[in-house]
Image: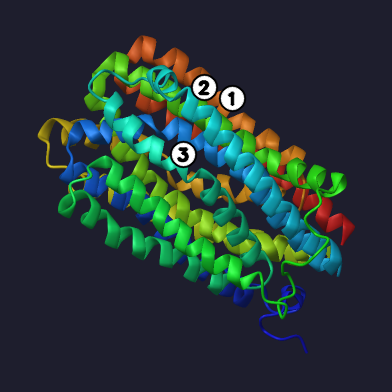
Amino acid sequence: MADKNSPLILGTEPIGKLLARYSIPAIIAMTASSLYNMVDSIFIGHGVGPMAIAGLALTFPLMNLAAAFGSLVGVGASTLVSVKLGQKDYVGANHVLGNVLVLNIIMGILFSVVFLLFLDPVLYFFGASEQTLPYARDYMEVILYGNVVTHIYLGLNNLLRSSGHPKMAMYATLASVVINCALNPLFIFSWGWGIKGSAWATVISQVISLVWLLWHFSKKSELLHFRKGIYGLHRDLVSAMLSIGLSPFLMNLCSCLIVLLINLGLKEHGGDVAIGAYGIVNRITFLFIMIIMGFNQGMQPIAGYNFGARQFPRVLEVTRMTTWWAVGVATFGFLLCHLAPRAVICLFTTDEELVSVAVKGLHIVFLVFPIVGFQMVASNFFLSVGLSRQAIFLSLTRQLIFLIPSLIILPRFFGQVGVWGSIPLADFTAAIVTAIMLMRQFRKFKTAS
């Protein structure tokens, strides 16, 4: 009988029990990760001011771009490790570990160097004004200094979860969150570092968690651990990782373009205050999105392993169960943001003008939010079983085909409301396309089983 910490249990234990075991730590970790970002916004809002929140919002496109390159390696490697463990290819799984470390170092350094050289022009392009640029620059400079640490930390944490240690992955994330929460008030209020203090708190907390992850993967007793001969880049592994990771990469790349369009639209139809309001609404939305992503992360190794082992009924079962849970979370977010929007916004700021604009935006953005849970799980299903083309198509459908055209067209007729309204419109239409594709794939699995 397989040990409860062995990845072999992914193919034998009841799906509900497995999903709880893998999802709960991931949800805690992802929620903590979201709170990580919310804490930054809350301390910046109350400790620096409303223009600092607008400056922080201007960094979102660049942060999404950094996340795009991180997910290109990390998500693909996580799925590949799950599949290889399901196939009993332990040598290949360890080579994935080595390749992830090397690729994250290369990408992290290159990204930082390029954007530090052109930071001011990039931020102006993202919608910065003379008032908000200093805040955005101060924050982003520090984040870029630590970008390579962030890439390695997130990549190794994904592999830790996929190799049968979801609780350890959760502890690593929780540690960084707790440290960040402790350092933020110290750096902002006590030491007077302003928005830079929040950025330094983020980087330092990730450095500490990364040290722990490196120590874990250095232990020879682990199935996946650092060893000689795994660091040379293998063309087939890199190709497979990048192929699977292309979907989340394109999703984050589109997110960068989308946030850019949102910022530019809000700047034209509402100014810096509207951009700050979006920064707050984005953080609130991100909290519920990250919880759903926690379910997806719990689902991913189960679906990936059983797909590799050709146990298709188990793949279908974990997808259905995850969908119900995710829709429940999204529905709770919908109710909270429609019944008590002002109380939620006031967590970030007491500036009356900013609160008023953010409340209106929150109402519109969460208009059809319950279906977002379904759409996210369905897209993750294709990613988890290595069907990257379908996952890429679904990502591009929502973002390129529906959302970006809406952001270009609707503000011309409806102004600021058109910017906010583009988001729920894209969610609704993308969910319909996703449902059709998911039902077709389910039928294929049923035939194969």
Query: Which type of secondary structure does the marked residue at label 1 adopt?
Result: helix
Q: Residue furthest bottom?
A: 1
| Three-letter code, disc 2 | Ile
159 in relation to 285, above or below: below
Disc with the residue nearer the chain's start (3 vs 2): 3
Instruction: Between residue 410 and residue 45, name the one nearer to us.
Output: 45
Query: Which type of secondary structure does the marked residue at label 2 adopt?
Result: helix
User: Can the viewer see residue 193 in this picture?
Assistant: yes
Instruction: Between residue 148 and residue 275, name the one nearer to us.
Output: 148
The numbered mark at residue 400 is 1
In which quadrant is the C terminus drawn? bottom right
| Three-letter code, disc 3 | Leu
**Which residue lies under the disc numbered 2?**
404
Query: Which type of secondary structure does the marked residue at label 3 adopt?
Result: helix
| Three-letter code, disc 1 | Leu
- Residue 52 in the figure: left or right of residue 180: left
- Residue 195 in the figure: left or right of residue 124: left
Toward which corner of the image does residue 168 lie, by quadrant? bottom right
Q: Are marks 1 and 2 in contact (CB under 8 Å)?
A: yes
Q: Separation of disc 1 and disc 3 at Cα?
A: 27 Å
**Count of numbered circles in the view:** 3
Dot 3 crowding, Cα within 10 Å, few <14, some 14–19, many 20+ = many
- Could you tell me which residue is drawn at 70 percent across and 38 percent down? 246
**Which residue lies under the disc numbered 3?**
144
Disc with the residue nearer the chain's start (1 vs 3): 3
